[in-house]
Image: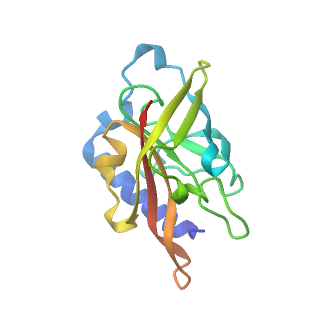
Amino acid sequence: MARPGRVVLAGAVTGILLFAFGKGMQTNSTAPAAKNVVPKSIDIPSIDVDASLMKLGLLKNGEVELPPYEKPKVAGWYTGSAVPGEKGASVIIGHVDTKTAPAVFYKLKQLRKGESVKVERSDGKVVEFKVDSIEQVHKDSFPTDRVYIEDGLKLVTCGGKFDYAAGEYLDNVIVYASPV
């Protein structure tokens, strides 16, 4: 589990980069039909994920909001990204673990190219994606453009080595997926 301070730091870096790229990133979804549509749940059968989704925005300080630690089995959709199934980058964030147990994206790094990710939307559509690639990157090298600007679904969690002295993970695990 990442220490809240490190999660905030990673969120702050992401928020600063989002701000630097301008407000246009916060309105990637251009389809009028999707204006009031939100993703409700995510299903990844190969790693036993079946979770509800909450909305995540930007905090007043520009940091990306994260799902609360009190809800480890819930992931969050960043509302500044496209609705899954619409044109643009769609970003879903979840914790890897808590102090005492695995969280919603604990097995995310086990996903493989070609596996299925399904997102149910509030309009009743279920959008299916196939995994294109998975990468693990140091938090200081987070690929902001690729995650928040390029088309497709991105799933993000913490990963890599856990620095016990600092109480945080050093990396992020990112899954990139395309609509089927």
How many numbered markers are drawn? Answer: 0
When the figure is inspected, residue 55 is found, relative to residue 29, above or below; the finding is below
Seen at 36% across and 21% down, the residue is 30
- The quadrant in which residue 100 appears is bottom right
Q: Which of the pair 71/84 is nearer the observer? A: 84
Image quadrant where one finds the N terminus: bottom right
Seen at 46% across and 59% down, the residue is 173
* 89 with respect to 83 (left or right): left
Going by the picture, which residue comes out furthest to the bottom?
165
* 97 with respect to 59 (left or right): right
Seen at 50% across and 42% down, the residue is 57
Going by the picture, which residue comes out furthest to the front?
114
- The quadrant in which residue 31 appears is top left
Residue 98 position in % (x across, y down):
67, 65
Seen at 36% across and 47% down, the residue is 147
Residue 10 position in % (x across, y down):
43, 62
Residue 22 position in % (x across, y down):
27, 40
- Identify the coloring: rainbow
Residue 131 position in % (x across, y down):
45, 44
Going by the picture, which residue comes out furthest to the left?
21
Going by the picture, which residue comes out furthest to the top?
33
When the figure is inspected, residue 165 is found, relative to residue 22, above or below; the finding is below
Image quadrant where one finds the C terminus: top left
When the figure is inspected, residue 22 is found, relative to residue 106, above or below; the finding is above
When the figure is inspected, residue 22 is found, relative to residue 95, above or below; the finding is above
Q: Which of the pair 63/154 is nearer the observer? A: 154
Q: Which of the pair 68/127 is nearer the observer? A: 127
